[in-house]
Amino acid sequence: MALAGLALGAVPTPIPAHAAVTPDDTTTRAQAADDRARRAARAKRYRAAIDHYEDALRLEPTAKRFFNLGVCHHRLMMKHAPQSPAYETHRGAAVDAYNRYLQATPDADDAQAVKEMIRAMGGTPLSAQAPEPWTIDLVEPDQVPDPPHFENEASHDGRPTPDLPSEPTPPAADPGPLRQPRWGVGVFLPLSFINPVQAAASDELRPAPNLGLGLSGHAYLGRRRRLHLGGEMVLAAQMISAQRRHRFSVAYITLVIEGRHTFGGGRWEVGGGGSIGPGSQALVFTGEPRWPCSVDEREASRRGGLWATGRLYLAALLGKRRNHAITLRLGPGIGVFSRPSVASTEVADPDNPDAEPLRCREQPHAFAAFGVSEQAALIFTLDLGYSPRF
């Protein structure tokens, strides 16, 4: 989304006149400020480095100092959440400083590379014919580039030295860029309540939640990566006491769509969306006596259907790059099921062994026998999860 014409002042700050300062004194003071800036930059104190580079530029402007000033702003930009005020301030200042470098040394060997970096940051490279002051229009890029290394100065006489090697930055001390994630995976603990009212009224069931394990995978779409599109798989069952013979178990696979918004300097995220997909619910046999027309030795009956849920979520984003999310999600839903399964055999009546065998297909299925209707089921979900993002 285009930011409305962000105007950055590009006229170099005039050097204050001082009758007692000779050219040699100016160069010496500029060199001292430059040295302080370099020490601060090596220590990752980029705000202090910016102040010292600006002092050096007021005394003696050089191309490399503009470039290094841009690198400091670039690195500070990457430490803030995209679209935050601090992010946009440093992004505009970095583009401005890189453009000053191009203006001071248009024929530098890396001029084209710097122009491409400015475009990748969403800025407009300065052309040789552009008048001053200029206006730089910033747009939101799909992905911003990593900051370059600092450039060395061979001398302090104002001449650029683009061919000198860069100073390496220790990777262990650099927290790295805050990038918008492209995809993620996750694991979560779902807690779901299904048919709670009917289960509470049943003599056989109880309204205990289903607790289980869920796995997820998703991609982040859109220019600002604010849309989640992915899928989830869940297996869960009721945790019940031995006094109950049957319990619910559920399994489902759903398509998930969610939107997100970050705040608090990129440390927090809120969002909402929904999921839909096929699932199944079973009445699992856990004790004696079991339901006479049980489908098999483990399940009394099972029914399939379609699950649809809405959800709201809150996430805490952790790590230096904010690429670890602890999420809390909750929301209501509904399940629409097919007719439950029943055994196709004849079995002896456990209450009257001498009577004719029960024809299971003519008997009510276990859900109905335990007081759970075939109507749509009310679902409420709550889950806590962890998701690394890449």
Image (cartoon, rainbow, N blue to C red):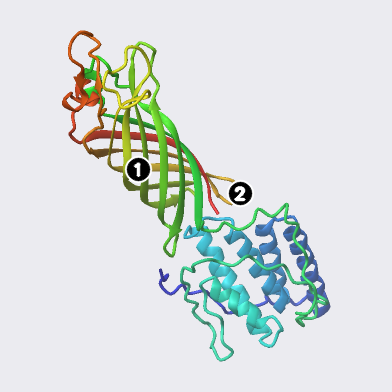
Q: Say if mark 1 contacts mark 2, CB within 8 Å.
A: no
Q: Which residue is mark 1?
A: 312
Q: Nearer the viewer, residue 314 or 31?
A: 314
The residue furthest bottom is 129
Q: CA distance from mark 1 to mark 2?
A: 26 Å
Q: Nearer the viewer, residue 388 or 285?
A: 285
Q: Is residue 323 above or below residue 203?
A: below
Q: Residue at x 22, y 38 (%)?
A: 338
SS for tag 2? loop
Q: What is the quadrant of the N terminus in the image? A: bottom left
If you read the primary sequence from the N terminus, does the residue marked by circle 1 or circle 2 appear first?
Answer: 1
Q: Is residue 300 visible?
A: yes
Within 10 Å of the Cα at label 2, are there few (<14), some (14-19), or many (20+) other Cα atoms? few
Q: Nearer the viewer, residue 85 or 32?
A: 85
Q: Amino acid at mark 1?
A: Leu
Q: Which residue is mark 2?
A: 320
Q: Amino acid at mark 2?
A: Lys
- Residue 380: image quadrant is top left
SS for tag 1? strand
Residue 182 coordinates in the image, percent (x, y): 50, 58
Q: Nearer the viewer, mark 1 or mark 2?
A: 1
Residue 102 coordinates in the image, percent (x, y): 64, 82
Q: Nearer the viewer, residue 373 or 344?
A: 344
- Residue 116: image quadrant is bottom right
Q: What is the quadrant of the C terminus in the image? A: bottom right
Residue 369 coordinates in the image, percent (x, y): 20, 21
Within 10 Å of the Cα at label 1, are there few (<14), some (14-19), or many (20+) other Cα atoms? some
Q: Is residue 290 left or right of residue 388?
A: left
Q: Residue at x 37, y 34 (%)?
A: 382
Q: Is residue 236 left or right of residue 24?
A: left
Q: Is residue 61 visible?
A: no
